[in-house]
């Protein structure tokens, strides 16, 4: 009896190892950054990451983070080293980072939801397999704490206050790319990929697009029924496209940055958002 | 030019930072207000004719954005940081904050706005 169980277990183990090997070597798993994770895989990766950070940050002692010097030094370092990937209020990250999977989350959300010790640990050591560099050898601990001080304070600033403190002019509007006005209604499936590739999911929770549990901007649900786009434009396809391409041109106060979305991609994104029904399923 | 012009912002910052040093923060902004009274105020001002608000019967409209899980929002209406004071300010005077907004001034009092904010911050259930 016991040997029966043992041998069955052995066979099962061997079979699953063989299965895993076949899976890996066959190349079935798609590593393309343009393809989204499935929700279970994403959940697994994120949970492992969160837990790993939480456990390791437990014993780190947080120094006094108040004072304008820390904030100012942190803001300077952040703008030099981090804003390319993580953006800032009303300021888009660089183009390359928008296509990263996972997408670097905006510092405003991390600063609200992570403890100072967790941010410190993450910045010092970086995160394997995500694109987040470890800064241990490039920044001193004091400098990292300065960045932490900035990170936990910046969610309390409006975009306008941030521009003022950082001494930046508002993002100049992206030059409009001439593409020949495409009046077609857009390709919803391409729009879903565009939502990933422009990093929209770093700030918005969007049905059918796997991404972080992001609450920087409003969730993009039931867009077909909305009366207004961003509370300022009447909801129409053309206005939605206009907002996606030039939010700060429409509302200079908004925290949504100019992302350089092309006319075609904005049209595709609009097609995807309008294709969702009340429950967030795609209507076909 | 700018740092010099912004001492007030810095003062605000320290207030904001000083409360934040102990342990992980649970994204639940503290506001002095009564959530039950807030629910009643939401119903009487008809916020639900424009918004989807979890826990308020009939509040399932889409003129404005959904107000579920509001404690986790980083910005109020995309223009103010989501602090209790700024949320109260928005609820009372949206048009003062953003002259372009389609949200109307409803004459909500300071106390009612605090209660409403308390309600929105406690309703974290559900994704929307």
Image (cartoon, grey):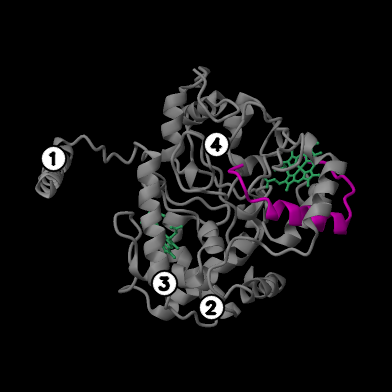
Which residue matches tag 2?
A: A70
Q: Mark 4, chain letter?
A: A
Which residue matches tag 3?
A: A57
Whether residue A102 is visible? no
At 67% from the left and 43% from the top, the residue drawn is A251
- In what element is the residue under mark 2? helix
* Marks 2 and 3 belong to one chain: yes
Q: Nearer the viewer, residue B75 or B100?
A: B75
Query: What's the mark number on residue A15?
Result: 1
Identify the magenta region.
B103-128
Whether residue A60 is visible? yes
Which residue matches tag 4?
A: A245
Q: CA distance from mark 4 to mark 3?
A: 39 Å
Q: CA distance from mark 4 to mark 1?
A: 52 Å
Q: Earlier in the sequence, mark 2 or mark 1?
A: 1
Query: What's the mark number on residue A197?
Result: none
Picture coordinates of residue A117 (x, y %)?
46, 73
Picture coordinates of residue A270 (x, y %)?
54, 28
Picture coordinates of residue B24 (x, y %)?
53, 68
């Amino acid at each position: 009896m016991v040997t029966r169980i043992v041998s069955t277990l052995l066979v099962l183990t061997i079979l699953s190892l063989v299965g895993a090997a076949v899976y890996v070597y066959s190349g079935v798993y798609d590593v393309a950054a343009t393809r989204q994770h499935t929700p279970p895989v994403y959940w697994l990766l994120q949970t492992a990451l969160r837990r790993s950070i939480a456990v390791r940050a437990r014993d780190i002692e947080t120094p006094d983070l108040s004072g304008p010097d820390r904030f100012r030094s942190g803001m300077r370092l952040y703008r030099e080293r981090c804003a390319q990937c993580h953006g800032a209020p009303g300021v888009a990250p660089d183009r390359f980072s928008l296509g990263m999977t996972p997408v670097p989350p905006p510092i405003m959300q991390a600063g609200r939801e992570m403890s100072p010790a967790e941010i410190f640990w993450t910045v010092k050591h970086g995160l394997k397999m995500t694109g987040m560099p470890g800064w241990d050898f490039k920044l001193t601990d004091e400098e990292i704490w300065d960045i932490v001080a900035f990170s936990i304070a910046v969610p309390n600033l409006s975009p306008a206050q941030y521009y003022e403190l950082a001494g930046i002019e508002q993002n100049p509007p992206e030059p409009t790319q001439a593409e020949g006005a495409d009046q077609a209604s857009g390709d919803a499936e391409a729009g879903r990929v565009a939502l990933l590739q422009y990093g929209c999911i770093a700030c918005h929770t969007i049905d059918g697009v796997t991404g972080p549990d992001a609450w920087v901007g409003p969730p993009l649900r039931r867009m077909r029924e909305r009366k207004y786009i961003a509370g300022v434009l009447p909801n129409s396809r053309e206005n939605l496209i206009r907002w996606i391409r030039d939010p700060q041109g429409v509302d200079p106060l908004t925290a949504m940055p100019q992302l350089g979305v092309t006319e075609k991609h904005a049209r595709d994104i609009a097609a995807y958002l309008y294709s969702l029904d009340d429950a967030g399923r795609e209507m076909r | 030019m700018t740092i010099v012009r912004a001492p007030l912002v810095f003062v605000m910052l320290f207030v904001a930072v000083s409360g934040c040093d102990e342990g992980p923060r649970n994204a639940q902004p503290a506001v002095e207000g009564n959530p039950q009274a807030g629910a009643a105020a939401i119903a009487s001002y008809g916020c639900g004719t424009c918004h989807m608000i979890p826990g308020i019967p009939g509040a399932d409209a889409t003129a404005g954005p959904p107000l579920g899980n509001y404690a986790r929002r980083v910005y109020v209406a995309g223009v103010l940081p989501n602090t209790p004071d700024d949320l109260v300010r928005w609820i009372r005077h949206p048009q003062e904050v953003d002259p372009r907004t389609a949200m109307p001034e409803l004459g909500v009092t300071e106390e009612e706005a605090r209660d409403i904010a308390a309600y929105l911050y406690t309703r974290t259930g559900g994704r929307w």
